[in-house]
Image (cartoon, coloured by chain):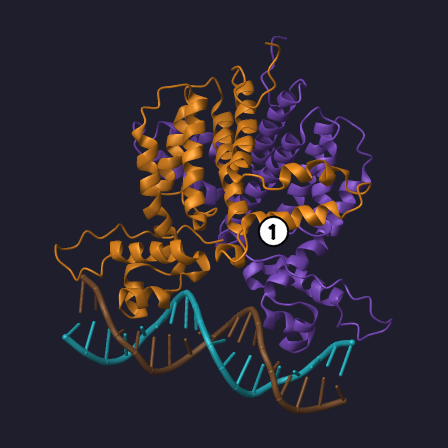
Chain colours: A purple, B orange, C brown, D cyan
Amino acid sequence: MTPPRQRPADRPSRERRRASHSIEAVLGAAVELLDESGEPALTIRGLAGRLGTGVGSVYWYVSGREDLLDRAVDHVLGGVLAEIERHPGTGDPVDELRRMAVTLFDAVVDRPWLGSRFMRNIDTEGNSLRLYEELGRQLLRLDLTPLQRFHAVTAVVGVVVSSAADLGQEPPQAVVDGLVEREEYLGRYATNWRALDPGEYPFLHDIVDAFDGHDDKQQFLAALDLTLNGLRLQAGQRPGPGARTEGP
Amino acid sequence: MTPPRQRPADRPSRERRRASHSIEAVLGAAVELLDESGEPALTIRGLAGRLGTGVGSVYWYVSGREDLLDRAVDHVLGGVLAEIERHPGTGDPVDELRRMAVTLFDAVVDRPWLGSRFMRNIDTEGNSLRLYEELGRQLLRLDLTPLQRFHAVTAVVGVVVSSAADLGQEPPQAVVDGLVEREEYLGRYATNWRALDPGEYPFLHDIVDAFDGHDDKQQFLAALDLTLNGLRLQAGQRPGPGARTEGP
DNA sequence: ACCTGAACACCGTTCAAGT
DNA sequence: ACCTGAACACCGTTCAAGT
């Protein structure tokens, strides 16, 4: 919804400054708040309070809450990028792409507030764009058209984004607080579904046992592998995990 | 983030009532506001103003803003469901699934505020759950395990959700207002990318022409077909559109 | 059964004034 | 160059009081 903001290049500025006041301190505290209680909990006042300053001070470093959020995301993405770049990346391109997507997914599990923000600012240089490049680079080694490559990265990122949306919605506060078990929470779905008329909801009855107590990561991997096998097919490769195996 | 709310069954109540005050009137006005200016523009005060009542009145019909949003989504989903159910649905299961997903996507294009909300409340009966059932039912005709079916619907819904996230972010206000052309907006990305070092960003340079002026629907269809071809492979079918064609 | 609107407890953002 | 905090213009939600 927001236009690409000007991102004033991180001011290097001079050597010593009050330790608590620097863009790094601001982003560090912001990430803390986000990690502790999620996106809605990050307020300018709360952040200023944690930094021991007034609200106006925050506005010296960021142009607003949206900018703050974007920078916090970029900040955290630095670590993800480092992890992704650690590996040589010389194996099968689709396998590499898969590994990167899983790394990204794991980061989102740790920080649901990354939500669908982590690929929002690919218009200008930053960690999102580097990540995007890193993912796409694998596809250069595949026999595809540029348009197919563009679509393929979109699709792979999309699998992570939609999983992130799932994760972001899931924990009702009671589950987060540990008052209600996740099992019990999922169990409610299953219980409700089983009470429905099987004639009207044959599909729900078919999957209800599989749904009950399902694993988010497996769900993500399944979606990812469907996409990647479609991609392998498009590139003329043989299918990977999750495809039907023919004969013994 | 929110726990499944109690949804007090739509009160039928008695025959005549002031026309402007009924749950239908409330949801109708809410949808209007959402269509006009998006999710953030839907405020309780604004809604009450449009209805010509006080804020307290709105709270008699819905339990809060989140509930209002969920009900508005459910309201609109009724139309989508009707369109999906109009067809016989006896063709190839994956083709049918594809058609439904496209219908869903088109609805999201029209109403970006459906965002990732349209499958959020599948714990209890409602149009989201019916939609979910309708999608999944196609898979019953495929040779898959229940877990594979569950994962497949998740994946297909995920493609729509991630496209919705894309669409929801896209229009900066200036583009919505028609002050800036979409072409020009996308062009900024392309211009920035072309200015980057090709050695550092080989992938971006490879796709920049394809990206420039790309079509959202084609992008969605490409991602969808990758997933569906992965699914066809899993079910032992022959691949559909988007797969590499072997010989003449 | 349904509506009213003041009151409460928050927000993000701005800006004159400070050092 | 960086900080302060009051002030402004909003929010969602509650609730005693009305009809």
Above or below A169: residue A9 = below
* In this view, A5 is above or below B132: below
Residue sitting at x 75%, y 50%: A79
Residue A245 coordinates in the image, percent (x, y): 61, 14
Disc 1 secondary structure class: loop
Report x, y in % for residue B129.
37, 39
- Residue B49 visible, this angle: yes
In this view, the residue in front, B226 or C4, is B226
Q: Residues within 10 Å of mark 1 (few under 14, many from 20)?
A: some
**Place of residue A64 in the rendered image (x, y in percent of width and height, measured from the top left):** 61, 67
Residue occupying the far right of the picture: A15
- Residue holding disc 1: A117
Q: Is residue A188 left or right of residue D19?
A: right
Compared with residue C5, is residue B244 higher up or lower down, i.e. above or below? above
In the image, B166: left or right of B127?
right
Residue placed most toward the observer, D10 or A214: D10
Q: Amino acid at mark 1?
A: Arg
> Which picture quadrant has residue A39?
bottom right
